[in-house]
Image (cartoon, helix red, strand yellow):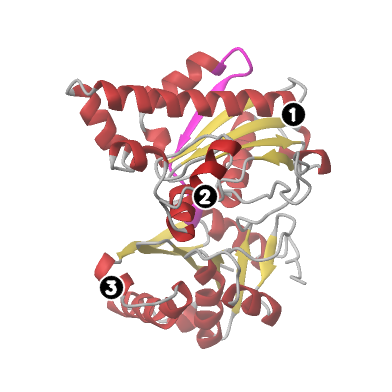
Amino acid sequence: MSYKVLAINPGSTSTKIALYEDERPLLELTLRHTTEEIARFANIIDQLDWRRGLILSALREKEFDIRNLSAVIGRGGLIRPIPAGVYEVNSRMRYDLRNAQMKHACNLGGLLAAQIAHMAKVKAYIADPPVVDEMDDVARITGMPMCPRKSIFHALNQKATARLHCDRAGIVYEKSNLIVAHMGGGISVAAHKQGRIVDVNNALDGDGPFAPDRAGSIPSSELIKICFSGQYTREELLKYISSKGGLVAYLGTNSVIQVMERIEKGDQRAQKVLESMCYNIVKQIGAMATALSGRVDGILLTGGIAYNEPVTEYIREHCTFIAPVTVYAGENELEALVANALVVLRGQVEPKVYK
């Protein structure tokens, strides 16, 4: 018996969808959203019906009847911290997605899946949302009890890349130690210890390497001085942390490709800033190596930035002494979502219950 699965991955300026029959892709689309279209909505959650309409229209244009679906799976949102796995979307999850304290387009994934699944009379799922929390307790504690470290990162692609590598290498994920660096608009570097992510930087809220549009870790006292300088509002500083920092703050772009083009034209400032970002990534990889006591089977580089060879070569040169470095460029999140839905449909995995 074959299964048809619709995967939905909402981002800030696009909604990516994929239709698969088992492991065979039938359709992959990226629905782009202009700044003007997004600006019509006061809150991200207000975009729900609009994005659902775009998805349904796109499927109708391709002459696909959603009644032929076996399941719908969406990118997980910023809900309560939960272990990794596949979760059926229930009323508790829908409530938490609608009322999430942290605002991000990924909060729409489970809601879109639930609405379309209801229309198709099938079940809706999410898998490995950004709030997957398997961290060791020792990794949570900071020097200020009121500021614990949180697990917010690219869990879906981190897990999928680690399992893909283990399958190709002929090793067992649950018996391996890996460091995975997801490098996109945000950068997360995680220590995978025998199937569990025991430590990872918070890739959304300001922790770890700075990224194309995120500030990463900042000297605390300097940040406090800026907060009380009167020069910036609370909202402006939060945007610096999550969307206006990193390459954007220094170079006015979050595109590593554009930065590379500027370097080729002799832009020394662009060269120095990009090198600094790479330097911060390798430092974080080194930190994760110590979290694994130096016993590392492999270092995996993934995400959109992994397509840029100068970046991956810099990391390889600085980290090969720890373990072999392998590149899995791209995010592969839609494929990962489909794979998670299929193991449930085939009865290989029982979906977890969100509480």
Q: Name the residue under label 2.
A: 228
Q: Give the range drawn in magenta.
A: 319-334
Q: Is mark 3 on a helix, strand or loop?
A: helix
Identified by mark 2, the residue type is Phe
Q: In which quarter of the image is the N terminus?
A: bottom right
Residue placed at 78% from the left, 34% from the top? 175
- Of badges 3 and 2, nearer the viewer stands 2
Q: Is mark 1 on a helix, strand or loop?
A: helix
Q: What element carries label 2?
A: loop
Residue placed at 29% from the left, 37% from the top? 251
Crowding at dot 1, Cα within 10 Å, few <14 / some 14-19 / many 20+, comes out as: many
Q: Where is residue 205 in the image (x, y as percent from the top left)?
A: 56, 50
Identified by mark 1, the residue type is Ala
Write down the quadrant of residue 273 in the picture.
Answer: top left
Q: Mark 1 points at which residue?
A: 291
Query: From this viewpoint, is residue 34 visible?
Result: no
- The disc placed on residue 37 is 3
Q: Position of residue 106 (x, y in %)?
A: 51, 64
For the image shown, how many numbered marks are present on the structure? 3
Write down the quadrant of residue 257 in the picture.
Answer: top left
Q: Position of residue 168 (x, y in %)?
A: 59, 33
Measure the alpha-carbon separation of dots 1 and 3. Answer: 44 Å
Q: Is residue 228 above or below residue 165?
A: below
Measure the alpha-carbon separation of dots 2 and 1. Answer: 35 Å
Front-most of residues 170 and 275 = 275
Identified by mark 3, the residue type is Glu
Residue placed at 72% from the left, 65% from the top? 347
Q: Farthest residue toward the left?
A: 265
